[in-house]
């Protein structure tokens, strides 16, 4: 029950959705049907949840009321025009604050559009597809390269009139016919591979380690991190592959071992965008060198992750050269250690916790509690895995 999930449930509740909690990790959501949400009486606070903000915007575009979306300081710095532009093409009225939050949406009725996503973004694609559920006609959304497809899988499983076409050039077209109700059903959500990435890195770095992660999602759009590590010589095995509710799931077994320096750039960055912070740490703590290029999108995340990585890598003993779209860093492993700050970013906090395991003196992380945004209990779990002598 991460911070982002809690924010999602809270916003749905403000829109009239009844949600029952079942234990610590189960929910029952009572659907209200197509265009059946209620107008909220106040702002919808997405807190730090960028995925929630963008997907919910697509749904709100098809509802005939006005809603205002807000977020925390971090989310309020992130650009919203990339989501506002396609929703305006549907016919929704969108008002942003200089291209940022707060963002006010006055929706429905809307008409289908044919939209090309200018920059690979699963969130923008999903927002357009969800708006298309409520639009008259068939909405088509084209993406230049294949991105995460969890939304398409869930919609197909729930009975949406959706069609996916893969292109020879690696792009993809998603078509959604509006006006069709979805079917209620049960879903089991697999373990998040982006969260598993930190534990995989820890097992690779700490000598003599072996770790099994059970029930992790291995959707092909989410396995670039594992593929990169395996190509680099990492001892990572995929066991017991299976399908659960349309999603590929498996157990991941990791054994410690040496890794070469990482040089990441070009088209590879799109599929690794969430894992680049931990890859930077792996490169420095393992072989002592890492190069990241073509990752300008990192500057638009929960914080400017390029700047955060540069500052923190220097703080633990690396020599860093920062550029507009990446960085180069090197040091003589093992890294020294020191004090870093999370900059309020969950992935930065968890990446440097792993760095601490591979350092001489340990790493102290200021504002580490932000890890709960995506991985509550991360530090306790990591501590439980560490064998001390």
Image (tube, rainbow, N blue to C red):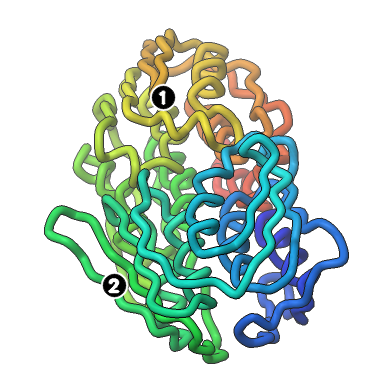
Q: Residue at x 32, y 29 (%)?
A: 294
* Picture quarter with the C terminus: top right
Residue at 47% across / 54% down in the picture?
A: 124
Q: Nearer the viewer, residue 314 or 150?
A: 150
Of marks 2 and 1, which one's residue comes earlier in the chain?
A: 2
- Viewer-proximal residue among 319 and 52: 52
Q: Is residue 215 visible?
A: no
Q: Callout 2: 10 Å neighbours few (<14), some, many (20+)?
A: some
Indicate the secondary structure of the residue bearing disc 1.
helix
Residue 44 seen from this side = yes
Identify whether 154 is placed above or below 361.
below
The residue indicated by pointer 2 is 164
Residue 141 appears in which quarter of the rendering?
A: bottom left
Q: Residue 94's x, y, as percent?
A: 64, 53
Residue 336 x/y as whole percent: 51, 14
Q: SS for tag 2?
A: strand
């Amino acid at each position: 029950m991460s911070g982002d999930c809690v924010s999602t449930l809270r916003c749905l509740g403000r829109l009239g959705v009844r949600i029952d909690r079942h234990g610590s990790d189960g929910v029952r959501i009572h659907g209200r049907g197509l265009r059946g949400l209620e107008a909220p009486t106040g702002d919808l606070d997405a807190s730090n949840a960028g995925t929630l903000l963008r997907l919910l915007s697509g749904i709100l575009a098809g509802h005939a009321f006005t809603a205002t979306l807000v977020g925390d300081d971090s989310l309020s710095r992130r650009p919203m025009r990339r989501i506002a532009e396609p929703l305006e093409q549907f016919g929704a009225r969108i008002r942003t604050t200089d291209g940022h939050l707060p963002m006010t949406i006055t929706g429905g009725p809307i008409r289908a559009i044919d939209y090309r996503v200018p920059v690979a973004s699963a969130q923008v694609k999903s927002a357009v597809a969800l708006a298309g559920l409520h639009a008259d006609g068939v909405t088509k959304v084209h993406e230049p390269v294949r991105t995460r497809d969890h939304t398409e899988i869930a919609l197909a499983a729930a009975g949406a009139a959706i069609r996916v076409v893969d292109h020879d050039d690696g792009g993809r077209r998603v078509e959604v016919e509006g006006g069709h109700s979805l079917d209620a059903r049960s879903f089991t959500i697999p373990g998040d591979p982006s969260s598993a990435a930190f534990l995989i890195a820890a097992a690779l770095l700490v000598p003599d380690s072996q770790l099994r992660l059970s029930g992790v999602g291995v959707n092909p759009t989410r396995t670039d991190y594992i593929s990169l590590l395996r190509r680099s010589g990492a001892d990572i095995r995929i066991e017991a592959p299976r399908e659960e509710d349309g999603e590929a799931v498996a157990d991941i077994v990791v054994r410690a071992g040496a890794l070469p320096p990482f040089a990441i750039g070009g088209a590879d960055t799109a599929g690794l965008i969430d894992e680049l912070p931990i890859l930077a740490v792996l490169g420095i703590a393992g072989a002592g060198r890492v190069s990241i290029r073509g990752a300008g999108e990192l500057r638009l995340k929960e914080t400017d992750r390029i700047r955060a990585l540069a500052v923190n890598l220097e703080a633990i003993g690396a020599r860093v050269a920062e550029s507009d779209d990446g960085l180069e860093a090197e040091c003589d492993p093992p890294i020294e250690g020191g004090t870093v700050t999370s900059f309020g970013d969950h992935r930065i906090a968890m990446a440097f916790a792993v760095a601490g395991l591979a350092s001489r003196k340990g790493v102290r992380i200021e504002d580490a509690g932000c890890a709960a945004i995506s991985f509550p209990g991360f530090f306790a779990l990591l501590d439980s895995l560490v064998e001390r002598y």
